[in-house]
Image: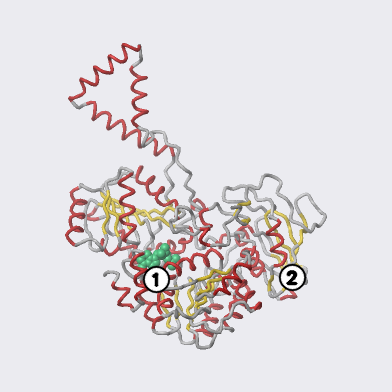
Amino acid sequence: MSSNDFLSLGISASVLKAVQQLGYEQPSPIQAQSIPVLLGGKNLLGTAQTGTGKTAAFALPLLSNIDDKQKTPQILVLTPTRELAIQVAEAFQSYAKHIKGFRVLPIYGGADIGGQLRGLKRGVQVVVGTPGRILDHLRRRSLNLSQIKGLVLDEADEMLRMGFIDDVETILAQTPDNCQRALFSATMPPAIKRVADTYLGDAEHIRIESKTKTVERIFQQYVTVKGHQKMDALTRVLEVESFDGMIIFVRTKSSTVDIADRLEARGFSSAALNGDLSQALRERTINKLKKGQVDIVVATDVAARGLDVERISHVINFDIPYDNESYVHRIGRTGRAGREGKAILFITPKETRLLRSIEKSTRQSIVPLTMPTNEEVSGQRIQQFTQQLSKTMATPRLDKFRDMIVTFAEENELDMADIAAALTYENQKDRPLFPKLDNIVAPRQEKRNSSSEKRSKRDQSPRDKSARPDSGEKRSRRDQSPRDKSARPDSGEKRSKRDPVLRDEDGHVVPMVTYRLEVGKNDNIDPSNIVGAIANEADISSQYIGQIVLHDDYSTVDLPEGMPDEVFKHLKNARVRAKTLNLSLLKAEGQSAPSSRAPRPKKGPKKIKSAASDNPSKRRNPKNDGSAPLKNKKKKTYTKKDKK
Ligand code: AMP
């Protein structure tokens, strides 16, 4: 297959050109199935998770039908978080780069509404936003949905979990009856099914079936790294793994070349293998791998199809495959001819679900790989160095050099060991024998028990440690929020459960303070509404939102101390079910008097990060590696506006 497959799916010429330039070689399974349905004008219900290529599955067909003359919103995408909103908006921008005058606007809470108002006034074809802020604009009449032709609910189950489902329904009810709708969700709990039944009519249901396949003789490991750290992580793994031949799988043709070049520059013998290369060149590369003239081949799925080379001891999935079958296919390139093989999978924190799904379908556990330490890398380099040294000492042409050094030592009364040390020091500068490597953080990796973990990262928030059904399918709608499963009427209160002590990712205790919110049970809210509002409006990771207690006409919530004034003011005016939170400080540690402002942190503002600006383009990480902008930072409690 080639990128012509996108053409045969029927996407427009300008969108096709962008896809080709991005180096997409073939549609992922969810894309192959969804694109014709959406191009055909039908509604779509997709069971798909992050990493399957679902953004392009809806963006490419919807963009193919866009009217570039019309400047009022034609496509609306609802996402549960601001990060996803930015990511999806960026994806739209890249797929629409050849559509003249195209504009997409991400709209989310916690950002200055002025910029969003100006953006909407200027005219946009695509709006991607979180439900609360979209509703806000609808109330202000700054957003007009009357011309919407395509509506997408992305990560619908997350929106449910974050308490946004009522907001979503309110928005859905304001879109034209004849607008095309697509809903993507990793799971299909009853509340999502109900929304689908109500608003999607007889939608086409697409899911990527995961057939069970067994893989034998292949030891499988995974490592969790953030996108921008993948290359460093790969290099480190390669330094300590002893391998014969290796295939590294990536998603795009451009990545094959990029990574092969970077590995070469780091001293690994590597070559790229992709669908752009002629058949003759591909065969030559595979032959080189067979003969040991090249050790590492960096390939796309298409180019590596049918590749059978006995000496492949390792398969590295640098980019996670779109589905379980192709995972099995890929790792089957090793363990040939009765040999043992090893497969290492790189995942970003958001791809944890895909990892679990692979484990489930292969009925085998994939165990965490611990990042090699400085000492291990150092030990390996020293071993290689001394081996090379022994070889060099055996060469016959050393006489002249020996004489030179002896003369030098005698004239200067130097010790031979000192000279050898100095030469070694000079020699290792490009590849230090005692390196000080960056700390590659593998978020949550250490906490995961690969066979028993059944829940996603967000599910592991300190409030919901007690067991609850995996997908929430057996529970009522209200029960589905992560915080409220333990909420039981308790002397009139509804109380969410959490660990007494909340810790950050480094295991440090996060000091908390209690705030009062002027919304309560009488306002028909539940804890997930509060979590959703605070997480999005204050841009605080939901894991740092502590215990929530609902009273009749007010509630309390524990939040990390040190909330910046700006965030505090913003939260004060944030709304849940059309009621202002009117946040006030109830109680800080060692403090009893209520206060109207946010407490200052006791120690330095360690956890308070300066956040990216409202402008998504400024939020991209400088390495421009495609990873989500805020994801590159350490897990945060609060973020603030950029101090440019
Ligand atoms: P998503 O599941 O939409 O978050 O996409 C995951 C990643 O896969 C993104 O980085 C996309 O750019 C990439 N991607 C999506 N479709 C393709 C494709 N057909 N070929 C190569 N990469 C893709």
> Residue 172 or 67: which is nearer the viewer?
67
Q: Position of residue 411 (x, y in %)?
A: 32, 11
> Looking at the image, what colour scheme do you see?
secondary structure
Q: Position of residue 251 (x, y in %)?
A: 35, 61
Give the residue pinned by disc 1.
98
Give above or below for 620 relative to 265. below
> Residue 93 or 8: which is nearer the viewer?
93
Q: Position of residue 589 (x, y in %)?
A: 75, 51
Disc 2 under 8 Å from ligand 1? The reply is no
For the point 43% across and 56% down, the residue is 625
Q: Position of residue 445 (x, y in %)?
A: 49, 52
Left or right of 76 on screen, residue 326: left
Q: Amino acid at mark 2?
A: Val
Residue 357 visible? The answer is no
For the point 44% across and 38% down, the residue is 374
> Which quadrant holds residue 304?
bottom left
Tell us which disc is closer to us: 2 or 1. 1
Q: Amino acid at mark 1?
A: His
Distance between mark 2 and mark 1 Cα atoms:
47 Å
Residue 625 visible? The answer is yes
Q: Earlier in the sequence, mark 2 or mark 1?
A: 1
